[in-house]
Amino acid sequence: MGSPIECTNLRKTYDGKVEAVRGLSLRIEAGECFGLLGPNGAGKTTTIEILEGLLAPTSGEVRIFGHTWNDNPRQLREWIGISLQETRLSEKLNVRETIELFASFYSEPCSTADILEELQLTEKSDAWVGKLSGGQKQRLAVATALVGNPRILFLDEPTTGLDPQSRRQLWDIIRVFQKKGGTVLLTTHYMDEAERLCDRLAIVDHGQIIAEGTPSDLIDRLGGHHVVEFQVSKNGDADNDNLDNDNLDRWRSLPSVESVRREDSSVCLSVREPHLTIPALLDAVTSHGQQLEHLSTRQASLEDVFVLLTGRHLRED
Amino acid sequence: MATTETNAPTLNADKNQQPQPIHPARHNGRWSGYRHLLWARILELKREPEVVFWVFIFPLLLAAGLGIAFRNKPADITSVVVIDGAGAQKTLAMLDHPDKSSRAHSPARSNVRATVLDRDAALKAFHFGKFDLAIESNPDGSYTYYYDPARPESVLSRAEIDAALQSAAGRKDALTTSAQSSSEPGSRYIDFLIPGLLGMNLMNSGMWGVGFALVEMRQRKLLKRFVATPMRRSDFLLALTSSRLVLMVIEVGLLLGFGVLVFHMRVQGSIVSIILLATLGAVTFGGVGLLTACRAQKIETVSGLINVVMMPMWIFSGVFFSYERFPQIVQPAIKALPLTALNDALRAIILQGETLSSQAGRVIILAVWGGLSFVTAVRLEVEENQLVSVFGEIGILFDGLKGA
């Protein structure tokens, strides 16, 4: 049997004009949690819907466990569970009825009681869907995906708009599914989600994968795992001269610095060992008669990777 | 429901071994999806107060309101006003007097309700339509009738009163006549109205219950979510249709029961024929509803379309009044409308006790409308919604036929 999900050279053009996906290939292994990370409009939803067999690609091939969507779509649907980016389930059905309804479509579903328990919806089982909070609705959406006993779970932006506690609850649910041997494909534009949840991820921009690997692999590409961010001024005014490209070179020569970039009025250094860089940085600032306005250090994130690769932030647009 | 719980093999931690059930599984039969879809649809309808009102209560209110309004003034009671004056009491006595000279007791006489008012009040009330006729006895013993030639009941009243007064005054009929009174069942307005309301209701709930429901589910992305499961799309359509039929049986039962109990309406034809015909009507309008909904992605669009489709039929198809009132030239077009065929066939069966087979022509009109709508809806919908088309396998079948 082939990989749970495999696609080669997917392309999707809407109305012969808009190219949403431009030659995307992926292979996701069993038991993996794979993330498609990218800004809004990058083509993540189009990609995941093609993989789910809900959208026909303009060209390219999709295989789920080695089968194409034309082979036996009903059998493939037995193997996958889906949560769409936005589904408003019937508001006048209660939680248990909704799960029972979805369970009835599969030949060997889980027991409704187990699913209610697992997704912490037991207390709400008699509540109408219309009365649930955002987090509860999203858990119900995932419950309808899990009740069919899927081998693959597709989640399109599962935590968008949720409060931190609800997001964490969902992450736990996804981990439990994965621990039981399930394969997960999710899209997100939250880098913390991608970093914590995904074994591997692909950064998607303009319908193409621009980088792929484990979160730490991707961060390694920055060269340094730390970011030192600072702002300098001369006599209290922001010293914009120091933000010119020429002057950025000045900072690149500091010890342990891997790369330099400008961010608004600050300078960001990707650094291997901050304890070597920071003393040298302070000396350099003082020797130029400047003052240090802000200084912060943090762990490098996928956001930094995205900025390095595209020059833009994930949450722009 | 009929699901059995079995213990599945314990889960296998080996990630490469495919696909093992992750939880203890139960087995669902072939019809499990259909049964749950149908039940969910019925629960949703039951929990939607608007649906209960528009589908069940509103037609009854309409029937009650119109039935009472048109029953209180049956055409055979003549209401006249006698202008107060010297001869007024004598006039009343003549109208009231049993007709000794006539061979038969005139039925007209007992149906006259006469009131005496002074001249101004009497003429005013007559002009406002409170009375059909005003009678003034002149000093010379002659009578003047005030009547409105544009009002049929006024014309009738004048003839009846004249005959009554003339015969009370001693006129002998030159010709011997006898009248056989015949009150055909179903000749009252309420008898005409109830089958019409039934037809209209079948149209309304078919269009809204199928067309609107579909677009609403599409807009909520619920349809896409269903299509993403192994649900058979034919089951989904079947459940939507069956939920319509369940409602249909209740609609028909309520309206006819209401007519029989409250208005003593007599149902002449067989209940089986009525149910079969109503089923065809419900399915036909379900098909028209599908066609109306197949390209619409928003509920605002489909609401407008449904009203555009239904409006002509409310007016032309003889729901509230006979379509014979429209010019002869448009009659064939009116008769080709599905609601006209349904209403006519319902009236023939309910009021005249006709059989379903005698209504073959109208049944064919309905079936053609339903069939063509369905086929066209499949084509357009599959083209529009592709993989997430609600028709799924049916659409693929059609594509195959097209290619052949």
Image (tube, coloured by chain):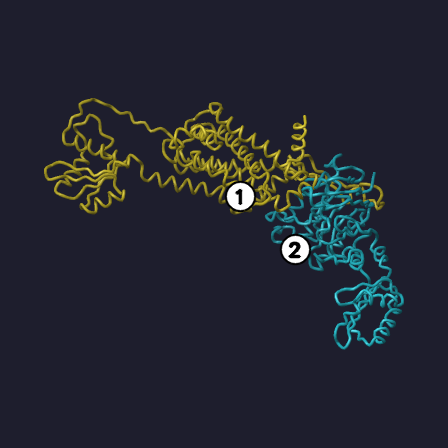
Q: Kindly identify the amino acid type of the residue bearing the numbered disc 2.
A: Gly
Q: Quadrant of residue B69?
A: top left
Label disc, if present, on residue B270 of the rendered structure: none
Q: Which chain does tag 2 point to?
A: A
Q: Name the residue under label 2.
A: A134
Same chain for the residues under marks 2 and 1 in the image: no
Marks 2 and 1 sit apart, C-alpha to C-alpha, by 29 Å
Residue at 76% from the left image edge and 45% from the top image edge? A22
Q: Where is residue B351 in the image (x, y as percent from the top left)?
A: 41, 29
Q: Where is residue A273 in the image (x, y as percent from the top left)?
A: 88, 66
Q: Nearer the viewer, mark 2 or mark 1?
A: 1
Q: Mark 1 points at which residue?
A: B303
**Is disc 2 in contact with disc 1, using a CB cutoff of under 8 Å?**
no
What's the colour of chain A in the image?
Answer: cyan
Q: Kindly identify the amino acid type of the residue bearing the numbered disc 1.
A: Ser
Q: The residue tagged with tag 2: helix, strand or loop?
A: helix
Q: The residue tagged with tag 1: helix, strand or loop?
A: helix
Q: In which quarter of the image is the N terminus of chain A?
A: top right
* Residue A216 can be seen, yes or no: yes
Label 2 neighbour load within 10 Å: few <14, some 14-19, many 20+: some
Instruction: Please name whichever residue, A138 or B9, is drawn nearer the observer in this view of the structure.
Output: A138
